[in-house]
Every structure is written in structure tokens, then in C-alpha cells.
Amino acid sequence: MSGDDSESAQTSHWERWTDDSGPFYQACAVFPFDSVAEPNGDSLNNSHPSARFATGITRKLLRNIPMFVLLTGTVYFSIMSLRAISTGEIQVNLPRLTFQAVGLLIPGLVIGAFWLYLIYRVLTATLQGSSVHRSTVFFVTTLILAAGTAHAGYTAWANAGATTEPAITVQMGYFLFVLVTGHLIYDGLALKTENLLARLGETSIVRQPMYDEFYTELTNSIGDTISIKWLEIPRSVGFAVVVALGPILLPVIVSPWAGWGELSYVAYSLVTLFVIAVLYDVFVLIYMFTELLRRDILEYQPFHPDDRGGFRDLGKFATRVNAILAVAGGYVAYRFYAEGILNLPSGGVEPSLLGVTWVVLYAGPIGAYVFLVLFWLYHSFWRLHSKMEEGRQQRIEELQREAKEGSQQRRLTEFQKNAKVEDPGLTREFVDPETDAPAWESLQDAPTWPIKRQGLFGILVVDAIPIVFTFIS
């Protein structure tokens, strides 16, 4: 391997194809400090990969997930709070409005708006090229939502066994889940995975032209769009509308319209449609990843500079998907505790419509999480491990075979020219990795896992936490 090739092999392709870098919570844009759209891709290092994880409105919302969560969350919880105040659930002493107060309020709002504009201008000039504002918005929003989530959990704990409604802040857990997973997905499955799959063809761990054919198929599969006359929308959006429109509209049709109060349901439904659309894109990407492992495309390199047989970046992709699953598992466990226990039928879970509905809404997601975790652990880490183990064994057998053939050639030269010397070792199956031969002894310590075993143990522990929490609750 030449110097340039070695340097290229050591470079990780698990990085964003955009010019920015940093932790996952700095990946998404914050309007108005950042552009709503992604970079135009004018330079070579900042060009859109051909295979796009998501397109259209789904991708724009992913990129701008902080503002999307802030806007929809503000609408939802403002209306819910106003409804609670109007029904007396929350007691608030509001000051009386007088003409004098209104006269002071209007110029105060004008001055306040101008003051905020000046702050915006100063911050825009100061933070240009910085990601401080992204971190600030993420953590401030996360803390607010986490506080509401903790309050809902405490309310469920304090009223366990009582017939009471979940806390008004219970859905903050849902918005927190969307915020965190949105950042993880946009940073990992969009920007980094797109770059990884685009650059994988330049590495030594894939067979050409088989990978080129796979990448072409990948480009045509993920981020696909559908056209309805003049309208072109992402296939994920069409899927979300078809799947969720009926269940979303059913409560509106059955129950009477409650005026402004129903706008909170509209905001919540928009977030749900977005989540289903992203889930569709994730499913397609995972399916194509399993196809990559199923086909004979990847080639194990035992002495690859990444110390993972060339599979280090694939292991990082698998870890990111597992992190997203762990966050989802945390949410379904929280939902089971903060909502499910309080909504448990008075007669317990019985074979009735109410009992079946409760199982589907609260116990079902826990079972689905367990299934998805087991599915992903097998189809990512275990299959990568099997492919690495198989590649190492094949390389050992090749070196053993080459050594035996060389030994045979030397003996034929040493003995009589017209006599055939049989070597019983030639019929041996070369499957013993403990054979004493310097040419392949170094392969005994070659890596067979895409990540460190300590990291794999940590993944198993994190995956088990939501399940343990559910049974404890």
C-alpha cells in the first residue's frame, strides 16, 4: 500500500459531507442564524452525495428540527395551558387590563421588538461560523422538555393506583424524543451515512463493480419521490399520510370540534406525521444496509489501518442506529409509566375492547422495541462479526494453502525427478487457526468485531435499560 493509499485508509468516512463538524446536537440548523436549506454544494468537499437519506419537506424539517419542535411544542402546550386555565385545572391570577395598561403595553412591545432585533443583529455577526447557538438552543429546549417530562413522571408516581389524568406536561416526553432522535438521525443517518456510502466505493473493503451496482440501486431506493401530475412529494410523506391520516382524523370526526382547543391536536398530528415519514426513510436505509451485508460485496482486510478490518465506519453506523433505538426505547418505557399506568382500565387488562386497546397502545410498543433491538443486534453487529470471522478464516486457509504448495514444490525438487512423492498433508482441510506457521500466526489476533468488545457490552446494557425500567415500574 502506497503512502497516499495508507493515509486514505486511515481516514474515517464517518463524517458529515457538509463543511461543519462537531457533536450530533450541532448538526441541525437554527433559523434565523442558519440557512433553512442545506449548502448548495459548490465545492468538491461540500457536494451532495447521489444517495440521499431523505428529500423534500422531510429533509427540511429534519435539518430544522429545533425550530420545528419549538414552534409545534409552543402551540401545543400554550393551547393546553389555556384550556387548563379556562377549566380551572390550573389557577392563575391574571392582572386586570385597563386603558392605561394597554397604552403602556403597545409602545413596550415596539421597544421590546426593536431591542430583540438589535440583539439578533449582534449575535448574527458574532456567531457567524460558530455553532454556539445550536448547542444553546438544543440544551435549553432539552432542559425545558426534560423538566416537563420529569414532572409527568412524578405525577404518575405520586398518583399510582388512583383514578387521575396524566400530567398536562406528559407529551413533553414525546417532543423531547422527537428533538433528540431528530438530531441523531440528521447527523448520523443523513449527513454521515450519505458520506460513508458515497466514499465506501473508494476503499479496499468493497468489490468493484459490485458496489457500484449496489450504490446505484441505493440511490434509486432511499429518498425516493412520487409524482402526482404536477405535484412531487417524498415517498415517505405519501406513506405517512396513507398510514396515519385515518387514525388522526377519526377523533376529529367522532368528537365535536372544540374550537381553538383542537389546534393543539393539529400541532401534535403534524409532529406524528413527520415521525412516521422519517421512520419510513429509516426502514428503507436499514433494509439496504442488510442487503449490503447479505451480498458478497464487502471484503475483510485483517491488517487494515482502522484496526477493525476496514469495518470500523460500518460499526459506527450500527452504533448510531442502536443509539436511536435506545432513545426510542426510553420514550416508550416513559410513556408506559407516565400514561399507561394511569390509563389502566379499572378492572385490569381483560379480553375486552378497552383491554386490547390498552395493550396495543402501551404494552405493544415495549414488545416492538424488544423485537427491533434483537433484530438490529443480529443484522448489524453479529452479521458484521460473522463476515469478519469468515474473512479472517479464509485468509488463514489461503496462507496455509500457499505454504503447503511451496513445501510440495521444494520436496519435488529435492527428491528424484521421475518419482512422485505423496504428501498426506495436501488433502488436509485448512480450517485450524492454531496451525503453527509464521505466515498466518499474526492473523490469530486480527479483529473480528466492528467495535471494541467493551463498547458492545455498553450497547447491550443501554438496550436493556428501558426493558428493566418497564418491569420495575
Image: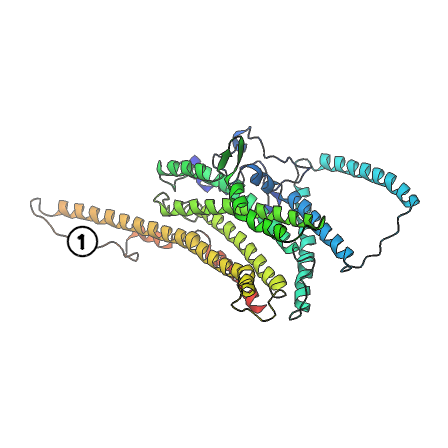
Up the image or down, 430 lies above or below 31; here it is: below
Instruction: Using the image as rendered, state which of residue 221 and residue 422 is in the foreground.
Output: 221
- Whether residue 290 sits left or right of residue 438 in the image: it is right
* Quarter of the image where one finds residue 201: top left
Name the residue rendered at 63%, 65% in the picture.
342
Up the image or down, 183 lies above or below 217; here it is: below
Name the residue rendered at 64%, 53% in the picture.
255
Instruction: Using the image as rendered, state which of residue 433 and residue 175 is in the foreground.
Output: 175
Percent position (x, y) of residue 461? 52, 61
- Count neighbours of disc 1 (C-alpha within 10 A) and say few if under 14, some if 14 to 19, many if 20 or more: few
Residue farthest to the right, as pictured:
100
Instruction: Please identify the quadrant where the C terminus is shown.
Output: bottom right
Whether residue 350 is visible, yes or no, is yes
Name the amino acid, label 1: Thr
Percent position (x, y) of residue 266? 65, 47
- Whether residue 163 sits left or right of residue 94 in the image: it is left
Element type at marker 1?
helix
Q: Which residue is mark 1?
A: 427
